[in-house]
Image (tube, coloured by chain):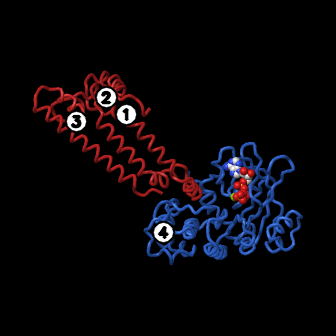
Amino acid sequence: MDTAPLATSDAPIDDMAPGDVVLDCQADQIHYGDFLAVRDSHVPIRKNQITGFIGPSGCGKSTVLKSINRMNDLIRGFRFNGQVHFHGMDIYDKKVDPVSVRRNIGMVFQQPNPFSMSIYENVAFGLRLNRFRGNIAKKVEKALRGAALWDEVKNKLKNNGLSLSGGQQQRLCIARAIATEPQVLLMDEPCSALDPIATRQIEELMVQLKERYTVAIVTHNMQQAQRVADQTAFFAVDISKGGRTGYLVEMAPTAHLFENPKQKLTKEYLQGEFS
Amino acid sequence: MTGLPSILAGVFAYAAVVLTMGSYSAWAGGIALSLLMIPVVMLTAEEAIKMVPQAMKDAALGMGCTPSQSMVKVVLPVAMPGIITGVVLAVARAAGETAPLLFTALFSEYWLQVNHPTASLAVLIYNYSGMPFENQIELAWTASLVLVLMVLVLNIVSRIIGRRKHV
Ligand SMILES: Nc1ncnc2c1ncn2[C@@H]1O[C@H](COP(=O)(O)OP(=O)(O)OP(=O)(O)O)[C@@H](O)[C@H]1O
Ligand SMILES: [Mg+2]
């Protein structure tokens, strides 16, 4: 069970400069059973940057994002054709254990989903899972500070994580995800269940997080993509071949994509969204 | 399986245990009663595990849990009150059963010995209530009261456990 290739081959990542491609997702075809959900989408994810995924509903943003840490593996009929290069290896290689992939690539979900245990244990969960031998309390504090939640919860670490407000729960989930210091953090519409103030807090947090981590975020909110993302990937649905297949239309630095999109489709979509 | 007539559990344990071991015994009674309890426990445990939100299971997976780690560390602790409730209710039900014990544990006037016939409240009530002596009929009434109180207490306990910490 303890497959360590990802954890031990840490040489290349430390040599990387911010902006280098740390994770290269080449999704040729993603199927759910017979249904082709996504095709021909190449999404490079750059170190210490935030990569935003935008596009209409059902275009496969979540599908691609979850493919990156193999969260879809348990869905019956899911098939990924392509590669995801990370640490110089393909995480879909047969030799790679999906569990170790998920320990290195953290995930924050659309609905805040803390465990039904204390705030402290929520954050310590990943550390214990990885049999961390050092000072857990220190790591927990660091993660909670990293998620901008420490001051609000430092006096009630023993309370159940579910007793927090929605925005606090989402920050707790972020703390839980960063406690083990994953190299990449995936977020699937992390603010969609939150009010504008909590959304702002999470956005500010993301910008801080990119100093230390690499972040990929799905969002429906164009302003949010503009505020936080360094690179933006625009997906659309192709209905020409009968199905509803999502694909990457265009990916560029955020300012370029929003100011002068190269593809007509991108332009139309952005105009629609902003008018 | 929950509808299994309790006497059949007794007949089964009679064939499987009493005949092979050669005597009525507390073991055989225990096996007959646990046969009756298993479906109740399984159904409530399954329900309790299904009640754990999928989002929480996804979170466990996303943290890098194997499916068994997710079960042990995340799902079972949340489902545990429900599971214990089921167990307690099943015990309460088994405590009142007479039929399956008639072919298995039988009855005895002596203290518990696992390899020999053994007394139980339910069979004691059944036996003594048919006796012609005032004294034993009164004992049967007392035993009934004790049994009812035990079942009541078990039901209350299961309520208290079931109410705790539901997500
Ligand atoms: N578990 C699944 N089984 C079968 N099909 C699925 C599954 N999950 C998603 N799909 C299909 O794959 C396509 C892409 O879905 P996905 O959830 O990736 O879209 P999305 O871009 O994230 O949409 P949204 O913005 O609404 O979240 C959709 O047509 C959807 O119906
Ligand atoms: Mg989605």
In the image shown, does B151 or A116 lie closer to the viewer? B151
Residue A134: give its label. 4
Q: Which amino acid does label 1 sit on?
A: Leu
Label 2: which residue? B100
Residue B45 drawn above or below residue A119: above
Badge 2 vs badge 1, beta-carbon distance below 8 Å = yes
Q: Nearer the viewer, mark 3 or mark 4?
A: 3
Q: Which of marks 2 and 4 is in front?
A: 2
Return the x and y of residue B21 as percentages of the image width and height.
Answer: 29, 24
Label 3: which residue? B121
Q: How far, Cα to Cα, is label 2 from label 3?
A: 13 Å
Looking at the image, which residue is at 17% across and 39% down?
A: B142
Q: Which amino acid does label 4 sit on?
A: Gly
Q: How far, Cα to Cα, is label 2 from label 1?
A: 9 Å
Label 1: which residue? B36
Looking at the image, which residue is at 80% across and 50% down?
A: A244
| Chain the render paints red | B
